[in-house]
Image (cartoon, grey):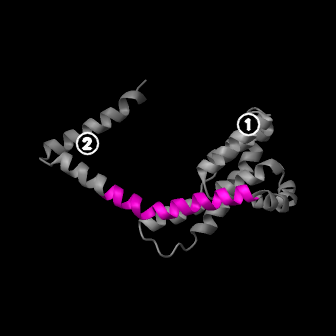
Amino acid sequence: MISSFLIPLVLFYIVGYGIINREKVYDIFIDGVKEGFKIVVGIAPTLVGLMVAVGVIRASGALDMIAKLLTPIGELLQIPAQIIPLILVRLFSTSAANGLVFDLFKEYGTDSNIGLIASIVMSCTESIFYIMSVYFLSVKVKKSRWTLTGGLIATLAGVAASVMIAAFMV
């Protein structure tokens, strides 16, 4: 109940604070919107490139081929073969991964072990390459240092946790 009042309360607080401090709240808002549009225009080519790449990889069958190559490793880690394409796509695109999750739900059901693992994977992992390309580009980060390594380790931990949590739920 309180959550439905929280966002309007925060907005009124920000506007009220600006008015009390004699700031031109609307002008500041418009400047922020203009800056936001500049950022969107700057990262749009990267977004389009990522979306096209994921679409091509899915449509060409390359995703299924890579997943089949990784299936023995997945079996060793007790990751169902159906989840491996989801893990790979999740590294690049949340929306494409959502499409795969819905396909898994249709085929296996939401309450199946595969459905549970897919749901938990989506909440325990992140789109590392998307974040690195889009967010780092927008703030002009040149050296990512250990970001990719840390992200991949965190993804592996999230997938392992997903499999274990789903095993307890079934």
As drawn, the label of residue 88 is none
Q: Quadrant of residue 15?
A: top left
Mark 1 and mark 2 residues within 8 Å of each other at the beta carbon: no
Q: Is residue 37 magenta?
A: yes
| Residue reaching furthest to the top | 1
Residues 63 and 73: in front is 63
The answer to whether residue 83 is above or below residue 8 is below
Magenta residues span 35-60
As drawn, the label of residue 14 is 2
The reply, left or right, for residue 100 in relation to residue 146 is: right
* Residue type marked 2: Ile
**Quarter the N terminus occupies:** top left
Question: Which residue is at a point 31% across and 58% down the rendered structure image?
Answer: 35
Q: Is residue 127 magenta?
A: no
Residue 22 % position (x, y): 11, 47
Residues 31 and 161: in front is 31
Q: Which residue is mark 1?
A: 105
Residue 152 % position (x, y): 66, 63
* Residue type marked 1: Phe
State the separation of the CA atoms marked 1 and 2. Answer: 42 Å
The answer to whether residue 139 is above or below residue 3 is below
Q: Quadrant of residue 52?
A: bottom right
Check disc 2: other Cα within 10 Å, few if <14, some if 14-19, many if 20+. Answer: few
